[in-house]
Image (tube, coloured by chain):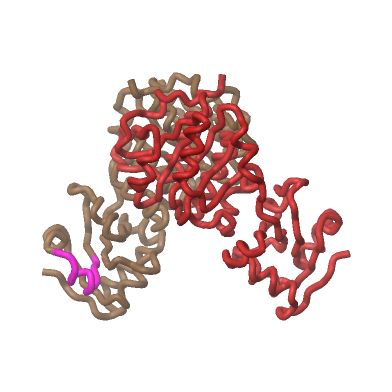
Chain colours: A brown, B red
């Protein structure tokens, strides 16, 4: 049976609200998945701690499935608003466990395809990168320290549920990861305006990974020097650079193209 | 000599402020280009009506070039803020004429490469599409009625100055344009989840155009039926769709790849 929360002072309510801050998400290993579509994307085997829904939502939706799966709390619209990251919330959110998957499994794959990012800062960009990685079959995403938090609500929204499909590893030491890649014979390509080749000539059917940089600063020297090769996306027009998520998309889709047959 | 505006009631000030509304931009044929980088991207032959800068900006920058080019107004920070679309404005903006370029020139080109969009709604997406089109050498962008205004500040910001490089035509009748394309032997491909071919097999070295749809609804039946072929971007992973600007980017970059040699 769903329970009702009616006060801002309720302990569970305060606990859920605390998860809008990164430090509390990190401490608890939890995040908030908000909205009808996002909640419906939660895979059956994903751990959900609880659901929070509004009274209005219960009027228009069958909530028995929520109730069966995890503790479900019904709150007023007024209590829901501070939990929400949107101006017009749909009145449903899930408190989910962060992915706890280790890296072991993905390193065992044949010809894996990874994406690395250094200090990606814009939530919309990171979310879009994760969504594109999911579409293009990336085996794992590694984010350096200094990237925006994957469980930031704006990132999550832009992933359109892809956060549940692609393993994303945060606070990664790029040096360590690249050593591991060398060990496994995975070629690492830096996306760089000064690259000496286009992606189209690279042997991307083999194990490969791209490293993309910060929106404004691009890649640091240290990070670039960890890579086997620097690759440049051609720009026959007049723009001097691409949006970070577009650059990542063009590179990931070249892997898709080469692996199609 | 730069002039100073000190009152909210100043007529010129009120006129500039009115341009934050689309209907006034449309009436006057003007738009606001804001920020150091954006203003520096204005090509020498682009018509600028006036510059507006803050006192603080004049302290740290040489404004003689502004003054030579167009009437320049110095305002207080307090007066600048309501003109700006950002929270921390850099204190410089230009009132620019909208592009008045006709379509004649672009139809004369050999094997042109166009992008059409139906009801693209998200300002960030449209801006990013324009930036990517600029990078990939698109000859012109056609936007149907119901798309977000190109001169919306958020769109402009995301173009990173590419609005000055690529001709963008708004409120376009898609039916009319596609007839013109048929006449000129330009193949029109609809980006569609139910497409029957991948972009990689299309003869994109010839004159070609892609039509992309709304972020949430995709393309309408009417628009899809105007196209010669429906093309599908492969998604070997689990995501069900791509962000609209990523889909456009993948398609535009396939043209770049094929035309590289």
Counting from the top left corner in percent of width and height, residue A58 is at 18, 70
User: What's the residue at 62%, 32% (across, down)?
Assistant: B108
Say which of A148 and B252 sits in front: B252
Image position of B156 (left or right of A116): right
Image position of B4 (left or right of A67): right
Counting from the top left corner in percent of width and height, residue B97 is at 70, 56
Look at the image and tell me in which quarter the C terminus of chain A lies.
top left
Residue B106 lies, with reference to residue B12, above or below; the image says above
Look at the image and tell me in which quarter the N terminus of chain A lies.
bottom left
Q: Is residue B105 visible?
A: yes
Say which of B34 and B175 sits in front: B175
User: What's the residue at 42%, 31% (across, down)?
Assistant: A253
Extent of the magenta region: A52-63
- Specify whether residue A61 is painted magenta: yes
Counting from the top left corner in percent of width and height, residue B137 is at 59, 34
User: What's the residue at 48%, 46% (across, down)?
Assistant: A145
Residue A2 lies, with reference to residue A225, above or below; the image says below
User: What's the residue at 70%, 47% (across, down)?
Assistant: B41
Query: Quadrant of residue A60 in the image?
Result: bottom left
Say which of A196 and B40 sits in front: B40
Image position of B137 (left or right of A210): right
Query: Quadrant of residue B57 in the image?
Result: bottom right
Say which of A57 and B252 sits in front: B252
Q: Is residue A138 visible?
A: no
Counting from the top left corner in percent of width and height, residue A143 is at 44, 42
């Amino acid at each position: 049976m769903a329970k009702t929360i009616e006060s801002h002072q309720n302990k569970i309510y305060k606990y859920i609200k605390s998860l809008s801050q990164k430090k509390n998400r990190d401490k608890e290993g939890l995040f908030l998945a908000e909205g009808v579509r996002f909640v419906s994307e939660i895979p059956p085997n994903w751990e959900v701690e609880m659901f929070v829904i509004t009274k209005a939502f219960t009027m228009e939706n069958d909530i028995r499935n929520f109730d069966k799966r995890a503790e479900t709390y019904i709150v007023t619209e007024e209590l829901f608003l501070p939990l929400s990251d949107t101006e017009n919330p749909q009145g449903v959110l899930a408190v989910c466990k962060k992915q706890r998957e280790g890296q072991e499994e993905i390193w065992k794959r044949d010809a894996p395809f990874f994406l690395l990012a250094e200090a990606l800062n814009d939530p919309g960009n990171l979310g879009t990168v994760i969504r594109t990685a999911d579409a293009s079959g990336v085996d794992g995403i590694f984010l350096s320290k200094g990237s925006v938090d994957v469980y930031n609500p704006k990132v999550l929204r832009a992933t359109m549920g892809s956060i549940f499909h692609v393993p994303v590893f945060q606070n990664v030491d790029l040096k360590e990861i690249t050593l591991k890649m060398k060990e496994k014979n995975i070629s690492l390509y830096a996306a760089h305006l000064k690259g000496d080749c286009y992606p189209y000539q690279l042997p991307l059917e083999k194990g490969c990974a791209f490293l993309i940089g910060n929106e404004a600063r691009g890649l640091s020297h240290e990070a670039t020097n960890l890579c086997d090769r620097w690759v440049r996306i051609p720009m026959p027009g007049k723009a001097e650079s691409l949006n970070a998520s577009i650059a990542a998309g063009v590179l990931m889709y070249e892997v898709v193209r080469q692996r199609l047959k």
